[in-house]
């Protein structure tokens, strides 16, 4: 999978819009949702949002080791993340918001979201024989929202991936349809509310925008121009 810099940037902008309502992303953005383990409340933070019981500790550890302006204050919280709930810790949340204004945090987040989500998504695409830019957006979004391609979703449609002789566009279309149905009918209303993601992707498939060269892309009411 060889994305151009513009195509990669479009993928990042669409995800930023999905996660924070801004193409550029809001580095200090915090949301609190009941989507942690067993639906526990948790903090979700950053440009493309990473979670308290997910990879927030990794992100903040990178920031602390980069000697950002708030590294000293954030450092003592690292052992608590994912262990001691911080969702109601006003001091911690203020530190995160303030750190989002630090250029060091912004650089760290750009690196983090690339290493933790974009590169694994591109590796998955390569391993399975996908080559089209819209496929990259679909898979990157899945890695951001779910951490991977959820195995049970792959069992809900018949097309094989290109590496196994399937048609790429058919696989992506069926996968997005399966994911859309899963989100729309989920027992958790928070996930039901994220169908704007798959609606956007379905729209780009309908527009035959496989090269992502038909701009703008409308992502969660945000126009993406690349």
Image (tube, grey):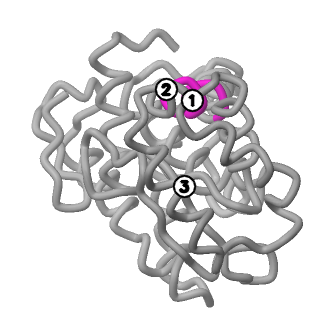
Task: State the CA–CA distance, disc 1 to disc 3.
Answer: 12 Å
Magenta segment, prevailing SS (helix, strand or loop): helix
Q: Which residue is mark 2?
A: 104
Image point 27% across, 24% down: which residue? 211
Task: State the CA–CA distance, disc 2 to disc 3.
Answer: 14 Å
Numbered label attached to residue 68: 1
Q: Looking at the image, do the residues carrying marks 1 and 3 touch, with CB atoms under 8 Å apart?
A: no
Image point 19% across, 27% down: which residue? 226
* Precedes in sequence: disc 2 or disc 3: 3
Residue neighbourhood size for the residue with mark 3, other residues' Cα within 10 Å, grouped as few (<14), some (14–19), many (≥20): some
**Residue 141, percent from left and from top:** 49, 46
Determine whether 224 is above or below 153 in the image.
above
Q: Element under label 1?
A: loop
Residue neighbourhood size for the residue with mark 2, other residues' Cα within 10 Å, grouped as few (<14), some (14–19), many (≥20): some
Q: Magenta stretch? A: 109-116
Q: Image quadrant of residue 203? A: bottom left
**Quick check: 83 left or right of 99?**
right
**Residue 134, percent from left and from top:** 37, 33
Comparing 143 with 207, the one in front is: 143
Residue neighbourhood size for the residue with mark 1, other residues' Cα within 10 Å, grouped as few (<14), some (14–19), many (≥20): some
**Residue 119, percent from left and from top:** 62, 23
**Quick check: 135 left or right of 23?**
right
Task: State the CA–CA distance, disc 1 to disc 2.
Answer: 6 Å
Comparing 211 with 9, the one in front is: 9
* Precedes in sequence: disc 1 or disc 2: 1
Q: Element under label 2?
A: helix
Q: Is 112 in the magenta? A: yes
Q: Which residue is mark 3?
A: 95
Q: Is 10 in the magenta? A: no
Numbered label attached to residue 185: none
Comparing 15 with 28, the one in front is: 28
Image point 80% across, 82% down: which residue? 38
């Amino acid at each position: 999978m060889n994305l151009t810099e513009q195509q990669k940037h479009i993928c990042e902008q669409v995800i930023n819009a999905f996660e924070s309502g801004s193409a550029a992303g809001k580095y200090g953005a915090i949301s609190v949702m009941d989507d942690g383990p067993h639906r526990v409340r948790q903090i979700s933070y950053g440009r493309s949002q990473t979670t308290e019981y997910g990879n927030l500790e990794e992100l903040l550890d990178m920031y602390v080791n980069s000697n950002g302006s708030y590294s000293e204050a954030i450092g003592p919280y690292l052992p608590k993340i994912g262990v001691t709930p911080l969702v109601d810790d006003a001091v911690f949340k203020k530190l995160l918001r303030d750190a989002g204004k630090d250029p060091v945090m912004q650089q760290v987040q750009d690196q983090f979201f690339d290493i933790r989500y974009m590169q694994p998504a591109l590796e998955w695409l390569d391993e399975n024989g996908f080559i089209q830019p819209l496929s990259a957006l679909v898979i990157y979004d899945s890695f951001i929202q779910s951490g991977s391609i959820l195995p049970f979703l792959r069992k809900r449609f018949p097309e094989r991936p290109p590496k196994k002789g399937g048609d790429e566009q058919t696989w992506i279309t069926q996968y997005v349809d399966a994911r859309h149905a899963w989100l729309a009918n989920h027992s958790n209303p928070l996930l039901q509310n994220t169908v704007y993601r798959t609606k956007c992707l379905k729209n780009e498939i309908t527009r035959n925008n496989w090269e992502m060269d038909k701009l703008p892309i409308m992502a969660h009411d945000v126009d993406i121009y690349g």
